[in-house]
Image: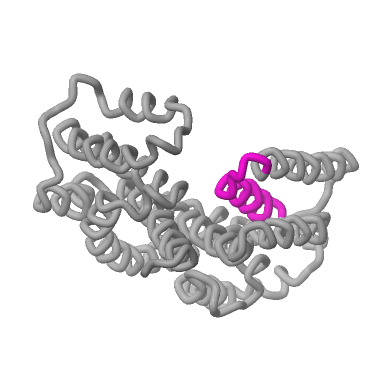
């Protein structure tokens, strides 16, 4: 007999996988049509997930589904609709396939009934193994790209990325105060409608953006997280996983884009938030990037300058 608690655990597990796969598809899209076809299109095609084209584009179908008001009596129709959407997109092109796949995965994250449907289980079962294979291959090339980029970076580029986040004026302090108030208000609205995923997104965005700021409202954020965890047990763990996945995606995307500054900042933010917790999601993946970075900083002899309290002393 399946209990309510076990159903919720299964939902959380599947929602977490779906969140990872959304990021993986976005990374896959950056790596060329051949990879996209090999690791997403081909597995779905071989599994029979294709159909004739729809009279409407998948973009219009997605928009139509987004505009539909929530109706608990119709939730059971969402997964079958998403499956048809993915099947239609197969004949439309790789970009529509990516968009429809991400749309389906986002629906899985937001609703337990969708996440535990036969269509969702089948869909994630088809695409997860090839996406994991791609990410393993991509991780090896990303580490090489990052090593080369940091090794060839100018000294000032690295030092700037390590600059502490400081308040330059009273107006910035006012802005941060207003941001935490806005966060409180938005979470109150979302929680009133039992929109736990929205609350998580709001908190995740705020923490990632401001956690390394000297005026970060840590106490206020912790109160909000505690309150949400009392309402939805496991919220704090799910929030940490969400932030780890987001930061790992930022690191991989910025490495691919050659944006060393963003990569270093994301690595630092991960460090501020998780404080060396080896049980945190993607800890060892990000630790490898951090080790590469610190090894090259040592080779370039930059530690003395990095330890100075302000760039004005350089």
Residue 163's x, y, as percent? 71, 58
Say which of 262 and 29 sits in front.
29
Q: Nearer the viewer, residue 243 or 189?
A: 189
Q: Residue at x 39, y 55 (%)?
A: 18
Residue 115 in sight here = yes
Please state the horizontal and vertical placement of residue 9, each as a whole percent of the image.
46, 66
Q: Residue furthest front?
A: 1
The chief SS type of the magenta part is helix
Q: Is residue 81 left or right of residue 243?
A: left
Q: Nearer the viewer, residue 106 or 191?
A: 191
Viewer-nearest residue: 290 or 91? 91
Q: Is residue 296 above or below residue 22?
A: below
The colour scheme used here is one colour
In the image, is residue 193 part of the stretch drawn in magenta? Answer: yes
Asked which quadrant contains residue 62, the reply is top left
- Examine the rendering and report whether any part of residue 149 can be seen: no
Give, as a single range, the part of the protein colored magenta.
192-210
**Left or right of residue 61, residue 41 in this image:** left
How many numbered discs, if any?
0
Q: Quadrant of the N terminus?
A: bottom left
At 38% across and 26% down in the image, what residue appears? Answer: 63
In the image, residue 45 above or below residue 134: above
Name the spot of residue 164 as percent of width and height, x first.
74, 59
Which residue: 59% across, 44% down?
195
**Percent position of residue 160, x then y:** 66, 56
């Amino acid at each position: 007999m399946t209990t309510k608690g076990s159903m919720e655990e299964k939902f959380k597990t599947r929602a977490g996988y779906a969140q990872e796969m959304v990021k993986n598809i976005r990374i896959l899209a950056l790596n060329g049509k051949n990879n996209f076809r090999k690791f997403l299109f081909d597995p779905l095609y071989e599994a029979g997930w294709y159909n004739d084209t729809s009279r409407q584009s998948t973009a219009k179908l997605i928009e139509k589904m987004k505009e539909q008001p929530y109706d608990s009596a119709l939730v059971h129709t969402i997964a079958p609709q998403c499956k048809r959407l993915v099947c239609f997109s197969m004949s439309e092109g790789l970009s529509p396939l990516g968009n429809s796949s991400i749309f389906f995965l986002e629906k899985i994250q937001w609703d337990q009934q969708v996440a535990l449907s036969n269509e969702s289980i089948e869909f994630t079962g088809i695409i997860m193994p090839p996406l994991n294979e791609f990410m393993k291959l991509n991780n090896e090339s990303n580490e090489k790209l990052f090593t080369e980029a940091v090794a060839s970076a100018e000294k000032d580029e690295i030092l700037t990325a390590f600059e502490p986040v400081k308040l330059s004026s009273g107006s910035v302090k006012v802005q941060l105060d207003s941001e935490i108030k806005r966060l409180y208000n938005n979470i109150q609205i979302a929680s009133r409608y039992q929109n736990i995923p929205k609350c998580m997104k709001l908190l995740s965005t705020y923490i990632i953006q401001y956690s390394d700021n000297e005026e970060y409202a840590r106490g206020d954020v912790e109160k909000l997280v505690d309150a949400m965890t009392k309402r939805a047990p496991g919220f704090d763990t799910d929030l940490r996983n969400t932030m780890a996945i987001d930061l790992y995606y930022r690191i991989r995307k910025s490495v691919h884009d050659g944006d060393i500054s963003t990569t270093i900042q994301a690595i630092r933010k991960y460090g501020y938030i998780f404080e060396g917790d080896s049980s945190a999601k993607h800890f060892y993946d990000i630790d490898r990037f951090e080790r590469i970075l610190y090894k090259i900083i040592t080779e370039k002899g930059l530690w003395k300058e990095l330890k100075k309290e302000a760039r004005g002393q350089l």
